[in-house]
Image (spheres, rainbow, N blue to C red):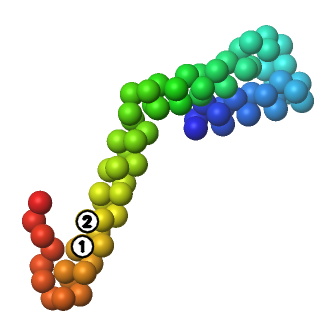
Amino acid sequence: MYFLGLGVVLLLLKYLEIGPVALWSWWIVLAPFALAVAWWAWADFSGHTKRKAVEREERRKQARIDKSRGAMGLPPRKR
């Protein structure tokens, strides 16, 4: 996401001809978009995206369990 944000900022600076970015090559200005695509491809290929989604769901599940146990007057389960 950072690469995408950086790419948008550099693109605007280049298009509006602001600062030293106006003198840079278009290849340099567009490079963060290529890096974003490479990052997303790696994240999907390596399973990073799925692993983070599973971790987030596990945290939400455990929070629901702890909240339910607290409502019943039981202490949270030790991990």
- Residue 29, by quadrant, is top right
| Residue at the disc numbered 1 | 65
Q: Residue 24 has which mark?
A: none
Q: Which quarter of the image is occupied by the N terminus?
A: top right
Question: Could you say whether the residue bearing mark 1 is in a helix, strand or loop?
Answer: helix
What is the C-alpha distance between the residues marked 1 and 2? Answer: 5 Å
Name the residue located 10 percent from the left edge and 65 percent from the top edge. Answer: 78
Which of the image's four quarters has the C terminus? bottom left
Asked if residue 33 can be seen in this view, the reply is yes
At horizontal 71% and vertical 14% (from top left) the residue drawn is 28
Q: Viewed as shown, does residue 27 lie left or right of 59?
A: right
Residue 9 vertical position relative to residue 79 in the rendered view, above or below: above
User: Residue 38's x, y, as percent?
Assistant: 55, 22
The residue tagged 2 is 62
Q: Secondary structure at mark 2?
A: helix
Above or below, 51 relative to 46: below
> Which residue is more in the foreground, 15 or 42?
42
Quarter of the image where one finds residue 26: top right
Residue at the spot 79% in from the left edge and 28% down from the top edge? 11
Q: Identity of the amino acid at label 1? A: Ile
Question: How would you rate the neighbour count of disc 2 (Cα within 10 Å): few for under 14, some for 14-19, many for 20 or more?
Answer: few
